[in-house]
Image (tube, rainbow, N blue to C red):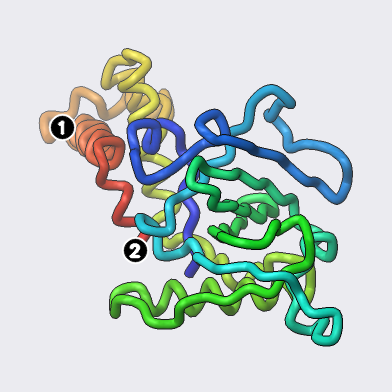
Amino acid sequence: MIFALSCSALISRDRGLWTSSGSRQAKVISPLGGFSFASSIESSANVFWSPRECPHVLAASAEPASRLRDNDAFDLSRVASQISILVSADEWQNVLFTEGFRNLQLAVVGQNVLEPARLTANVLWPPAEVKQRLEGLECLNALRSTGRLPPRFFPAEPRGARLRLVLRALDGFIAGASHREIGIALLGKARVERDWADPGDHLRDIVRRAIKRGRALMNGGYRRFLL
């Protein structure tokens, strides 16, 4: 599964990622000529991971494509997904393909990726990264063939419902809400009014555990999702 976590409350302190505000150069290409909802021309919420930190990022070298072997070329003009490009200070071109909540990132050195290029990559990886790297390569080949990020590479996260509850609890905690207020947001006013004073503290424990889990994720625990 290619997993993407996009929660600025969790990643704001991380040194293994870049945002376009810290780049040497950044641009967004949209085949429809527009820009994403809740984004602006002046700023971008896109997150780019270092390939050293996230095994889902594919590192590759680019060289000019041969006119005689067009089937080897990767051409961004044939991709229908939104494309964001960030050029880091060390001249790596970080290319992010996005469709809704699906995304795939390349880290490319060499030939300008705005021109058709032949991509080559190392195929020897640490054992713990082999599955993610192979899935990324398969997704990239599908993107090249179809111009889209196929949904089959992005299955629903089985922990999604629990993580949403945790993040909502974390948002409330950071905003200064009381545990009871957080409980109402998570579980509903009727249930909190009925069971909040229960001697077993069941609802209070739900809120406390959610906040504790959220703080642990915010302080670096979320990085386990990248593996």
Q: Residue at x 39, y 31 (%)?
A: 12
Mark 2, other Cα within 10 Å: few <14 / some 14–19 / many ≥20: some
Mark 1, other Cα within 10 Å: few <14 / some 14–19 / many ≥20: few
Q: Which amino acid does the dot numbered 2 rest on?
A: Leu
Q: Is residue 131 above or below residue 156?
A: below
The reply to whether residue 1 is in sight is: yes
- Tell me residue 173's x, y (percent): 31, 22
Q: Is residue 120 left or right of residue 55?
A: right
Quarter of the C terminus within the rendering: bottom left
Numbered marks: total: 2
The numbered dot on residue 227 is 2
Kindly identify which residue carries mark 1.
201
Secondary element at image label 1: loop
**Of residues 59 and 17, the one drawn nearer to the viewer in this rendering:** 59
Q: Residue at x 39, y 26 (%)?
A: 171
**Of residues 94 and 146, the one drawn nearer to the viewer in this rendering:** 94
State which tag comes first along the sequence, 1 or 2: 1
The reply to whether residue 206 is in sight is: no
Q: Residue at x 15, y 32 (%)?
A: 201
**Of residues 98 and 173, the one drawn nearer to the viewer in this rendering:** 98
